[in-house]
Amino acid sequence: MATEGDLGDRVQVLATQELVMAPLQVPGPILDVGGGGEGVIGLLREDVLAIDLHKEELEEAPFGPVKMVMDGRDLGFVDGAFQAATAFFTLMYMADRVDCRRVFGEIFRVLGPGGRLLVWDAAIPPQQATDKEIVALGLEIALRDVKISTGYGVLWPDEKRGRDYYMSLAREAGFTVREHWEKEHLFFMELCRS
């Protein structure tokens, strides 16, 4: 992750968050939307199909999951192809509500009845300083016997983005919320397709 010194005065760094990832108790295989980069979901399970819009993100991800370059707004799978999907710090990179709606709609379409979508992402507060263009979150991820130190940053959005923002969009796509939490700058949602 770039530090504030690397980007000058353009970035607001939020407090580093700790996230402990437990084994995923969902039926596989798992469609991991935005599964490049650290490839966290692929480190938790062997039966993962990681898709990402950017080939270089998939190349960076650890060996393990099947990897495909694909746009989450236009998934190339038949209806009901999966019983489980994940989005690990993916939604924050979607520019607007239209893109988020399309992604939720596509994931809903490719999940079968009872299918589940697990989402971990950044809760981004309203912009605090007008001179900061970028907001970044440091993250310490613990999974099994591995600890990953990373960070994610985006241009500061026009509005607060957190659990409630994304839950609203997920409900519009047809999902019901099974479980959720938000802690400081992190949130989790488990969504279900009826």
Image (cartoon, rainbow, N blue to C red):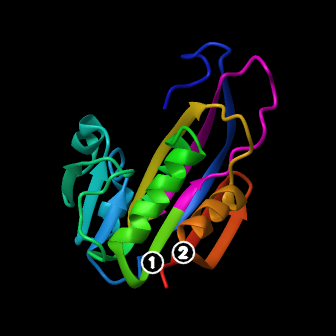
Q: Residue at x 63, y 58 (%)?
A: 166
Labelled disc at residue 191: 2
Disc 1 is placed on an element classified as: strand
Identify the residue position indicated by label 1 in the image. 116
- Spot occupied by residue 159 in the image (x, y as percentages of width and height): 74, 40
What residue is drawn where x is 68% and y is 14%? 9
Front residue of this view, candidates 162 and 182: 162
Name the amino acid, label 2.
Answer: Leu
Q: Residue furthest top?
A: 8
Q: Tell whether label 1 touches label 2 (CB within 8 Å).
A: yes
Residue 172 falls in image quadrant: bottom right
Residue 179 in the image, given as x and y percentages of width and height: 62, 78
- The correct choice, above or below, for 194 with respect to 185 in the image is below
Looking at the image, residue 10 sits to the left or right of residue 150; the answer is right
| Category of crowding for the residue at label 2, using alpha-carbon neighbours closer than 10 angstroms: few (below 14), some (14–19), many (at least 20) | many
Q: From what the image shows, is residue 40 above or below residue 151?
A: below
Rendered location of residue 185, percent (x, y): 69, 51
Asked which secondary structure carries label 2, the reply is: strand
Q: Residue at x 54, y 75 (%)?
A: 191
Horizontal relation, residue 39 to residue 87: left or right = left
For the question of whether residue 131 can be seen, the reply is: yes
Mark 2–mark 1 distance (CA, rounded to whole Å): 6 Å
Image location (x, y in percent) of residue 150: 48, 42
Task: Check the image and report above or below for 24 versus 41.
Answer: below
Range of residues picked out in magenta: 120-142
The type of residue carrying mark 1 is Arg
